[in-house]
Image (cartoon, coloured by chain):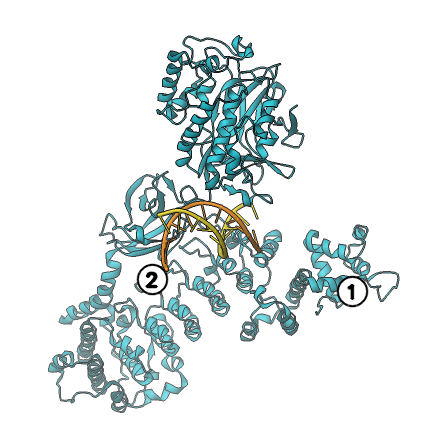
Chain colours: A cyan, B yellow, C orange
Amino acid sequence: MNQYFDLDQGKNVVAYVNNNDCSSTSGYSSANSPTSMTHSPAHSPETMVLQNEFANLNLPAISSNSPSPQHQLQHHMQNSPYHTTQASQLLTNGNLGMDIDVSNPNNNSNLTFGNMYMPVDHFYATPSPQSVGFPTTTNVVDNVTNMGIKNEYTAVLHIAEQPVEKFRFRYKSEMHGTHGSLNGINSKRTPKTFPEVILRNYKGPAVIRCSLFQTNLDSPHSHQLVVRKDEHDVCDPHDLHVSQDRGYVAQFINMGIIHTAKKYIFDELLKKKKDRLVFQLGRRELSTKQIQELHQETEREAKDMNLNQVRLCFEAFKIEENNTWTPIAAPVFSNAINNRKSAQTGELRIVRLSKPTGSVMGNDELILLVEKVSKKNIKVRFFEENEDGETVWEQYAKFRESDVHHQYAIVCQTPAYSDKDVEKEVAVSIELIRPSDDERSFPPLPFRYKPRDAIVSRKRRRTCSSFNSSSSSGGGSGHNSFELPKTVPQQGLPSVSFHDQTISQEFGREIHVDDLLPESCRNILKVNTSELEKLCVPMLGMLENDGHSQADSSAALAGTSSSGQNRTSNYLSEIFKIFDATRRTSDDEQLFKATRKRVKDLFTEHALNNTESNDTLLHEVISQRKDNLKLAFKMFQVMNYFKLHELANNVSNAEGDNGLHVACQQNRPHYIRPLLALDCSPNQQNHIGNTALHVAVKEEHLNCIESFLNGGQNIKLDLTLKNDDGLTPLHMAITQNRYDVAKKLIDHDRSSINVTNTKDGNNALHMAVLEQNLELLMLILDAQDVTDVLVAKNAAGLTPLELSRGRDNDKCRRVLEQVYADKLNLPMTWIPVNVKEEMESSSAEDDEESNPEAPTMEIKTEEPEMVVKTEETAMELDEIYANRQLEKLLNNKTRFDKLVTLLNEPSSRNAKLPKWKELAEKSSMNQLIFLWSNSEGMLNYIHYKSSKAEYKSFALTLQAMGLLTIHD
DNA sequence: CGGGAATGTAC
DNA sequence: TGTACATTCCC
């Protein structure tokens, strides 16, 4: 009667019993319309079958089974009050007869699992001939003391493998095609595991049943637990036969969960409950009253059933000789299975932060992009843990419900950090918490609190404090080596041109200003100051009368002039005047020192008066709206002359920018080398963590980048510095898909490719993969010793290769797989000049958008050196090129078909030999020829099954035969 | 397979 | 009419 089949295709320990085919296939179907439910189940076709099938079902009273520990626990936690109440009620009522009280207001679960196997139920509810005698079964030890309250089965069901915690429930309309199955919690790609139970303490054959239950009630769930069986989804319950020789293990394989649509919840639930009751009652028809009560109960349950959470119920039965099913163990329930797609139960994840840093003071606006959350049920937790993983600090971000945007973004304000006076950045973590189930996002994202000082005092320290120190040194007592040049420069004569002087002498080398200046500017410095002054005056606005003495000038300068521009020009003019005067009387060391101090003070004073921006003269001179080379270089000259390097070195404005930042922002590369020579630090990070190089990259000012990188050997550029977005300049270049920029950076310092960003832990290679930028990918792979980059894992624990597999990123994946496979460092510049045109023409024919990685040709023309390769490399390039062409060929149906036709033609060498066979021979695949009947087979082999070597060889052979490029 | 988006429905 | 959530559809 029962049909059996092995879930595991015959070799598994258990057999699947399809015991209610009919009822289950229609169980959830929408065809099962509301109206069909009005039928009395007793007369519905499904039930008829059920009845026939289980006509002899017997539920013998298992006298006196006190609950197993598991059982007890279960009920203790879930409905113990009811259980006892119900049981005693049944006992005391004594006249229940056929009627089970299904309307017990106490609890929705009148028909709980627990109680349905209680002898009292059976005693009163199933007075069928078979039941009346209820012989104690041989396998169940009867140690009743108090019927109905203490049940005990000796046999015990044990869950050996829980189901996964999260699983996508699918609607019925989604059930075509194969989707994932409900795996065990320990399941991996290989080996897979499945929910599994073991029946212990029992001898003889038994059946283990698995069905879908609600999580809060001991009642079936309206969703369907289905197993795919020849085109049909068979609904729960699912029964598996177990026996001693199989170790009593039941593994439930290949199950899916169907999300019952709202409108069918009631119907499905009612149906399940009816079926269940009928089964328990030994298959007799239900009385009208029973049905009525079932309806009411179902209505209640359906109203607030958790549709996103289910659990599995496992039961064990013994099939008696008369084909009655006797429970032999207390039912057990799996952990909850959550609907992966629901915002209420799905995984929490922070996809991205708007910025990875904030002030210790808190209240910074932070935007989190997140996976589906519900605004009423989400928190953002900031926390800090010590080495032992103990939480030492936590705070929640502030936001309102309306700050949760469309379930996918949260705009919140950072909490203040516990210690507002930290000296260094503090690394903390951020996670999402869903209060309803205490689910957390994983992994936590790093966030850095920046010291108050970093913002405020960087401003003060760098600008003001350096000024302060200089003014406080007013006594003239040198406290700093800069201030006491042992030798006063003797060249301070008007006739001495700037380019005779050297700067950066500390470096033990000489940089001639000449070298640094653009051709066009050189003779500027030859003009004397008064001429120069004339030149700059019109640009800066009129100078005040030069009647000020040095003593009173500062008041006048700082004074009331309304425009900042004007003030600047006043200061400049004053400084220049001093400069000129000093140069004329340069012999006096004392005078030089005094003058130097005077200049410095003016410089400082000017910046301090720029209360808004804190810009220094240097900043202003560099960043004028209209670039004024003469003025700027004059400024450099002054600073150099007076040895004011420390001013240039670390003076930053309110934004934390030094002169280099400004130059890069304004795209004025000609200032970069002079500034570097003046010790303006290239590694200084402004208030958002950007170095000047970051700025140049961000603005894509190539010339600036170049100037930087060519700054000279003594300039120690640190390419590993990360800005507040957690990115190095290289990372930014990749994000911006700037091959040219990235190349310059990598050429300058290869080691910088190993740096991971602090945003998501990706390194340059990861990022190139994400950008799907093959050129960049190759560029990075080309760097020597890329092993580290290849194996580095990002925050999500993925290597670049794994990352490339994640998405539709075929090209990158293939390249990476190749590289990983044979640890061959592919040359990055892979397209030799001689094939460029060909590439261009053939790729032009490809649909452009499907070819985002199509090489950008300008890159190659811009970088002629990259295509200059040794012969050896050229070979490799050929190979790569051929591989790539072949790939294109195989992927393009039109061309593929053409090639098939072409190769089916007879060989030119031998009319009896088709071209494809010739090809196979030449590419050393003659042993495989028997596999194919024509060229198509061979091409498919090459496309999908060939080894790398075969593929390569085939590509080269095809190329040699001139067949690699086929045009439409 | 999973991810994502379009479409539908109820407030 | 707009929003959130449900359902279906699609790659």
Front-most of residues A203 and A804: A203
Name the side, left or right, on which A373 lies relative to A360.
right
Q: Residue at x 23, y 49 (%)?
A: A419
Name the kind of residue labelled 2 in the image.
Gly
Which is more toward the observer, A681 or A890?
A: A890
Classed neighbour count for the residue bearing mark 2: other residues with Cα under 10 Å, few (<14), some (14–19), many (≥20)? many
Determine the chain carrying the residue at label 1. Answer: A
- Indicate the position of residue A433 as horizontal and vertical percent values: 35, 43
Q: Residue at x 28, y 75 (%)?
A: A619
Kindly identify which numbered label has been placed on residue A689.
Answer: 2
The quadrant where residue A490 appears: bottom left
Q: Quadrant of the N terminus of chain A?
A: top right
Badge 2 element: loop
For discs 2 and 1, the disc positioned in front in the rendered view: 1
**Circle 1 SS class:** helix
Q: Is residue A472 visible?
A: yes
Residue shown at 31% from the left, 45% from the top: A383
Residue A631 in the image: above or below residue A132: below
Judged left or right of residue A471, residue A621 is: right
Q: Which mark is residue A961?
A: none
Instruction: Report how far apart the C-alphas of labels 2 and 1 lie in the structure.
Output: 60 Å
Label disc, if present, on residue A902 of the rendered structure: 1
Label 2 and label 1 in one chain: yes
For mark 2, name the chain.
A
Q: Quadrant of the C terminus of chain A?
A: bottom right
Which of these two is toward me, A419 or A232? A232
Q: Is residue A169 left or right of residue A819?
A: left
Relative to A690, A746 lies left or right: right
Give residue A19's quadrant in the image.
top right
Against A146, is A252 above or below? below
